[in-house]
Amino acid sequence: MTDTAIQTDGLGKRYGRTWALSDCSLDLPAGKIAALVGPNGAGKTTLLHLAVGLLKPDAGTVRIFGRSPRDDVDALADIGFVAQDTPLYRDFTAADLITMGGKLNRRWDAAFARTRLADLNIPLDRAAGKLSGGQRAQVALALALAKHPRVLLLDEPIAALDPLARREFMQTLMGALGDGETTILLSSHLLADLERACDYLIVLQTAHVQLAGDVEQLLSEHRTLIGPRIDADAEIPGVAAVIRASYTDRQSTVLARLDAPIDPTVWTSHEISLEDLVLAYLAAAERRVAARPAPPSQPSDSTRQVSA
Amino acid sequence: MIWLTWRQHRKQAFYTLVALVAMAAVFIPTGLAMHHTFTSSGLAACLAKLGTAAVVPDANTCDSLSQQFANQYSGMTFIGILFVILPVFVGIFFGAPLVAREIEHGTHRLVWTQGVSRRHWALVKFGLVGTVVLVLAVVYALGMTWWFTPLVQNGGGRMGDISFDVQGVVPVAYTLFAVAAGMFAGALFKRVLPAMGVTLAAYVVVRVVIEAVARPRYMSPLTASIPIDSSSQFNQWSGAWVYSQGVVNGKGTPVLQNGNVSCGSAPAGSARAAAGGGGGCGQALLQQGLGPGPFANAYRYQPSSRFWEFQGIETGIFIALTALLVFLTVRRVRQIS
């Protein structure tokens, strides 16, 4: 049976009058490697901070394996967290940080952390402030992993790294957790960083979850359909939702979520890449936001071009 | 947690120790010299003989020795001012960054997602830093009490504004209060510099208000009344904290504020004695219509024997404020988002 690792229900967080995250309901099954994708300011960090108990929800609940993470030592024991920009005590050496973890955690595998860092040629006796960004990220990851967490959350772990360090980081992350026991949720504003590694996708924009689900399932139920010119509001049999549509004089191109087979005599159906899917959902969310304050005016929908 | 706290603050502890040693290097020789002069010049014995009674037959016996000592060491009194502000520096540099620096550097995201609760984190951290500060404060309070004694006995007495503030146990309470204020400001503002500024301002305001408004009311003052023709004098070496002095007439109505009139005793049977109410100078007051006599110099004061009562009350107030601030800080740390 599959447990739910991270469960949020109507979760919301407000700063002043602005909701940084609103009405967020998710069920991340245990063992998944989930990508949390969205542009900067979409609410990714807020969601992660709520999930690790750094923030207190203003609405709804968040549970990690059924437990509220807020100031709960037992819940914290299950959580490994690498915060954005991988904060470390600058004057602590990696060895100090590993010792610190041992003092602050009941379950702690110091040897594991040391071995990892030694394998990566990261000096244990150098102050963290003098390590490179990539090395600091690796130290932070080693610290999170040494807890042997059931859920590992990483907030933009590779945003500040150069391409080589990014690849190394992702490799070590996946290498360390190949067992499938640990649930991972990692955020990025660039899907490309995560696409190969992840089997679950959460798209966040404008404080709302736009899309969440298993990657394979998402890919299998979304298609780009090309067929005859139809009206913008015409229903296509088998299409549950139109994410994006563009029209020329004679042709319609529709990115749609399907819930039944399509008539192949009318429509040719093309598979869609994960990146296109995410971009389509982000663009759709953007259009909704843009449309909200302004009076309804049509042109923006049909002028968008789709690359065939 | 203990290890972490030590590891985070050991450098600071080391520099503090260096500063303490440097201060000792200045204060021990000067203190020894002052104590030596104080005793060897005979001033100590003279003042001891004069005693701390509020009214004595002749209060001027030690004046020349005192002047001599003051000429040599009165500059040192200004060092006392350094110790008036020392507690707030401890608050600014030990208290304010405690929570604020973690948040400023983002390291709270590291440490608060380990396996200890924020409450535990805060209590151990505050407890350890508090203990170190306590020891530090006790050391400098004891040292300052010793160092300052000759100047205080030769000067305004230990109930006086600066000398009360740097001696006994109140410096310890001030220091703990300053640190607690710094921690709370840090937890509230989450930035080191604003927290430091607010700590300084809050410390000054609280200290001034308590010193100016509350302290004079801890206990009701004693009064002394010396007939203006008495040979007895108010003992300015008694170390008393004089609230007011003035001349009162026979009805007890004040007729002259912040001054005194003294004619010395009139020989028995003389015309002055017969005039009653102080003869010469009394006559002058009578002619001004300030009568009836007899006139007396009246003093309202806190005797120096109440030093420890005052210290205890003031310490209690600041310890209570400290406890409140620590409670609020821990609560705040648990709420910080």
Image: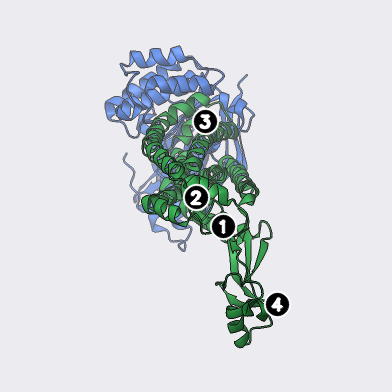
Eye-nearest disc, 3 or 2:
2
Of helix, strand and loop, which one carries label 1?
helix
- Residue found at x 70% / y 75%: B252
Give the residue at mark 1. B211
Mark closer to the observer (3, 4): 4
State the residue position of label 2: B152
Query: Who's blue, chain-wise?
Result: A
For label 4, the residue is B250
Which residue carries the number 3 mark?
Answer: B113
Q: Are marks 1 and 2 in contact (CB under 8 Å)?
A: no
Q: Which mark is residue A163?
A: none
Badge 3 local density, few (<14 within 10 Å), some, or many (20+)?
Answer: many
Q: Nearer the viewer, residue B165 or B176?
A: B165
Q: Residue B199 in the image: state x and y as whole percent.
A: 48, 50
- Which SS class for mark 4? loop
What amino acid is at disc 4? Gly
- Marks 3 and 4, how far apart at CA: 77 Å
Residue under the point 40% across and 48% down: B79
Pointers 4 and 1 in contact (CB under 8 A)? no
Q: Are marks 2 and 4 in contact (CB under 8 Å)?
A: no
**In-front residue for pair B12/B75:** B75
**Which hue is chain B drawn in?**
green
Write the residue at 43% across / 41% down. Answer: B40
* Left or right: where B179 falls relative to B79: right
| Chain for disc number 2 | B
* Residue A40 spot, x, y in % from top left: 40, 43
